[in-house]
Amino acid sequence: MKKFILIALLALNFQVKAQNYKVKPEGLRDAIDSTKTYVVLPIENKTAKALYEETLKYINKNYKNAEEVIKGKIENEYLKFVSYDPKFTELKVGYNKIPWNIKYTVELNFKDGKVKYEVIEIEIKNEGDYTLAFQGSGMSFYIYKKNGELKMPDAKTNIEEYFNNRIKSLSEFLQGKTSEDKW
């Protein structure tokens, strides 16, 4: 019984600390508090200035044209950048698997010891220029039906994994958990 309680407490602690998105009919939401459209990354022992500067390094290392993707900034407080990922996922539609592209805008706000990460715009389209919406009806592509029933579970899972991997990557970089090139 004691082992069960210990495992349950550890699992609960992991869930509380995990900063992830969930796909809901309304869009991306914090996995723990679905009223929030953002997640907060706790990065202990770093000032807002240090987090801002490290995030600029992260963007420069991960984007070919960092200056083109950054769309707004207030030194040591705020960054806004746009990402585009062609063919970020394939989804089964009928009998075919169709590749989908994603374009999204992220806003980051910095405070001592934490970063607020929010996807403020998201557009998912296929090669035929059809949009994948979070919720809809009729013949269009959507993840949830109007009544809230999940229609495309693979899309939900793939989008969650995609954004949660981005959050994890940034968080690990800011915590210094990534391996640097060893010369």
Image (cartoon, helix red, strand yellow):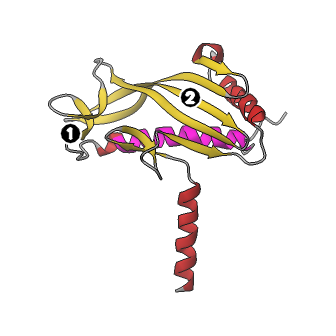
Which SS class for mark 1?
A: loop
Q: Main secondary structure of the magenta part?
A: helix
Mark 1 crowd level (few <14, some 14–19, many ≥20, 10 Å Cα): some
Q: Amino acid at mark 1?
A: Lys
Q: Residue furthest top?
A: 68
> Label 2 belongs to which residue?
107
Q: Which mark is residue 13?
A: none
Q: Is residue 62 visible?
A: no
Which SS class for mark 2?
A: strand
Horizontal arrangement in the rendering, residue 112 relative to residue 81 (left or right): right
Instruction: Judge whether residue 80 is colored magenta.
Output: no
Q: Position of residue 147 (x, y in %)?
A: 19, 44
Q: Is residue 7 visible?
A: yes
Magenta-colored span = 156-175
Q: Residue furthest left?
A: 138
Q: Is residue 8 above or below residue 72?
A: below
Instruction: Judge whether residue 164 is colored magenta.
Output: yes
Q: Which mark is residue 146?
A: 1
- Judging depth in this view, the residue of 34 and 141 nearest the camera is 34
Q: Amino acid at mark 2?
A: Glu
